[in-house]
Image: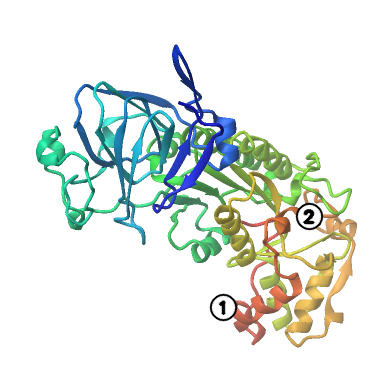
Amino acid sequence: MSASLHSIEQTSIPGLLVVSLPVHGDNRGWFKENWQREKLVSLGLPDFGPVQNNISFNARVGTTRGIHAEPWDKYVSVAAGRIFGAWVDLRDGPSFGERFCLELGPDRAVFVPRGVGNGFQTLEPDMVYSYLVNDHWNDRAQEDYVYLNAGDESAAIPWPIPLAEAELSEKDLHHPPLRSVVPMKPQRILVLGADGQVGRALRQALPDAEFAARNDFDLTREESYRSRDWSAYRAIINAAAYTDVEGAESNEGRRLAWQLNATAVSRLATIAAKHRLTLVHLSSDYVFDGSQEPHPETEPPSPLGVYGQSKAAGDAAAATAPRHYIVRTSWVVGDGKNFVRTMAGLAARDASPSVVADQYGRVTFTRDLAAGIRHLLQSGAPFGPYNLTNSGPVTSWAEIAAEIYRLLGRDPQQVVPVSTADYRASRPAAPRPERSTLELAKIEATGFRPPEAFAALRDYLSTDPVCGPLAAGSPPLTVSGGPTQ
């Protein structure tokens, strides 16, 4: 008995994979690498992180174990004997009810994704059946099982030994037919910070996600982390943060900034690692001192103020999760208090604002930021840090303000450029990076090309529910400094 190489074959059920295993035999018996992570992952098997190995011994031919869909992934194989395996997709979706059958011996294994029903019938005596799972069994998990009657006519599983002659458990005899099965729901995405600008944009980009505002999930309270059933999720998007750059320099603000931007992220990373979740963490150009341009993802952090320091610490914490995307962005504009709305309000009053002209970067509209995050999650892009802003020329705040005035039919010359030093002389201000331009080559290499910043600005001004009325002469919006999420 032998096979030369590992190989993986996709079946008619999405995600259900058949693995061919080399079996090396001689006069003493045989040997195989039943689970070899590096080889199998390189061939396309999900890196599903097994935590428990179960073995089932079945003495008699015809022993039949019914169709059970479990809330975790499985890797099933045979250590001795042969079986007839049957799998039925019991997940909510277009492939619900799809069936696949295969005779299985020591030379093959099957990867069974969460929600696909798994059953088998023994073809030889003293059969030993092994399966790796990526979650620990517990009573609560069993409540999420989905069952199918092994003799269901619509599934039409061609059992080699008729079920009337086979040996089944009493429970398996009374499981429901396919027409009565409630499909297993997919694992969800949890978005934290749902009431911020990025969170509101993510509601549009990911309508099927679960959104938690501070009242739903307080990042400062231990109970928020303990009370969640994390097995219900496949990803966490952390769009929550302390973003008051000036406030972070105060005693109270410093504590809050570190608590929300660093300590909370560390807790989320620990949860993501334990439950094999993907952690998407929103970061900032403020983790850099602005001394070079553009900033690549590989640049070491060099934050200037408390806000940037706490965000840099959060980045380091997020990176401890094996499956993570650290999404660094800059100059965020969305549904909330922001620079564009402020300038539109001043333009409506025909005012002449003084705007900093020696800080450079690119604006990021939350609609495009949310689309980029969705792309990372859906495309299977390699994990790690990504810069994500709108594209196009590098501009100053003053140039953006002038463009807003021009697009709203006002004279761009009304915008008065000032230096950062002059701006700070008249008001307290925390240190800010002079150059915030983030290099976009890495995100673009994944197939996502952010829209050009001034084109996105034009779209924002024409569709934003606040900027339109402001341009017609409504009272201006209160200025709010600092990055906002």
- Apparent side of residue 436 relative to residue 73 in the rendered image (left or right): right
Q: Which residue does the image show at 19% across and 25% down from the upper left? A: 60
The three-letter amino acid code for the residue at tag 1 is Pro
Q: Secondary structure at mark 1?
A: loop
Residue lying furthest front in this view?
Answer: 27
Q: Which residue does the image show at 32% across and 55% down from the upper left? A: 98
Of the image marks 1 and 2, the number of the one nearer the N terminus: 2
Mark 1 vs mark 2: in front:
2
Q: Measured along the vertical axis of the image, is residue 383 above or below residue 29?
A: below
Number of numbered markers: 2
- Apparent side of residue 123 relative to residue 103 in the rendered image (left or right): left
Q: Which residue is mark 1?
A: 465
Q: Which residue is mark 2?
A: 438
Q: Dividing the picture into quarters, in which one does residue 54 lie?
A: top left
Q: Where does the image place residue 372, in percent across and percent down from the top left?
A: 63, 60
Q: Which residue does the image show at 22% across and 41% down from the upper left? A: 160
**Viewer-nearest residue: 462 or 47:** 47
Q: Where does the image place residue 379, in percent across and percent down from the top left?
A: 58, 55
Q: Where does the image place residue 375, in percent across and percent down from the top left?
A: 59, 58
- Apparent side of residue 153 relative to residue 429 in the rendered image (left or right): left
The three-letter amino acid code for the residue at tag 2 is Leu
Q: Secondary structure at mark 2?
A: loop
